[in-house]
Image (cartoon, helix red, strand yellow):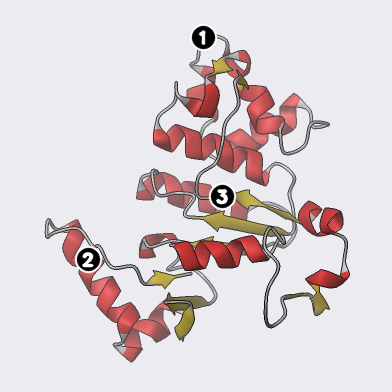
Amino acid sequence: MLVSSTVARLIPRFYEPTAGRILVDGQDITQVSITSLRQAIGGVQQDPFLFTASVEHNVAYADPSTNLDQIVQASTDAQIHSFIEELPRSYQTLVGEDGVSLSGGQRQRVSIARGTLTNAPIFIFDDATAAIDAGTEQRIRRALKARAGTHTTIIISHRLVSLMHADEILFLDEGCVIERGTHEQLLALKGRYFELHSLQLRDEHGSPRLTRHSNPA
């Protein structure tokens, strides 16, 4: 996951590329201000951090000027609203540092609500649903897709079910793109993606868990 996560951090310029260029709508990202670039990017990092603050403030961190209705909508899209409503003080319930009072899946869903709150044109999900079951992940994806406007969504994951719906899949191995195409096209190649797909299907039926480090993204 290291290589693909590094690629994700190059887009908002947390790292500067040492070679090549990254273009957004044909414009080199080094030719725009970092502030304007990052305002156009939302999403969730691999290890999101939650603060010692209320659930509301943790979600609103992405846009402190937002209102509660928008926070509730983002939380609903992230499939965490029902859980929050059951908390002792609902959205005012205090979350311990780094979300210690929440499960891994709950932390990720709060972070997804935060990351999508700004309705940015580019979303980056860096292994952001690893602790979320496949059914919940599908509902999150449908909710985000139903939002008004168009978005570019970049998903980084080892779990193929997280990205089988993508318009294009890039399969990375040691920093190189070795296969690219739709899910169906990559299966037809019967190459590395096909092999990973077969292994994960086998894993779902009880065989040893996958430990490879090749990254589809």
Q: Element under label 1? A: loop
Judge whether residue 79 can be spotted in this image: no
Q: Element under label 3? A: loop
Q: Quadrant of residue 164?
A: bottom left
Query: Which residue is identified by label 3?
Result: 45
Q: Amino acid at mark 2?
A: Leu
> Residue 178: x percent and y percent?
43, 86
Report the disc number at residue 88.
Answer: 1
> Residue 147: x percent and y percent?
68, 51
Report the disc number at residue 165.
Answer: none
Q: Residues within 10 Å of mark 2 (few under 14, many from 20)?
A: few
Residue situated in front as seen by the camera: 187 or 209: 209
Among numbered discs 2 and 1, the one appearing first in the sequence: 1
**Cα–Cα span, label 2 and label 1:** 40 Å
**Cα–Cα span, label 3 and label 2:** 26 Å
Furthest residue to the bottom? 189
Furthest residue to the left? 207
Q: Element under label 2? A: helix
> Residue 72: x percent and y percent?
65, 29
Judge whether residue 101 can be spotted in this image: yes
Among numbered discs 3 and 2, the one appearing first in the sequence: 3
Query: Which residue is identified by label 2?
Result: 201
Q: Nearer the viewer, mark 1 or mark 3?
A: 3
Q: Are marks 3 and 2 in contact (CB under 8 Å)?
A: no
Residue situated in front as seen by the camera: 47 or 54: 47
Q: Residues within 10 Å of mark 3 (few under 14, many from 20)?
A: many
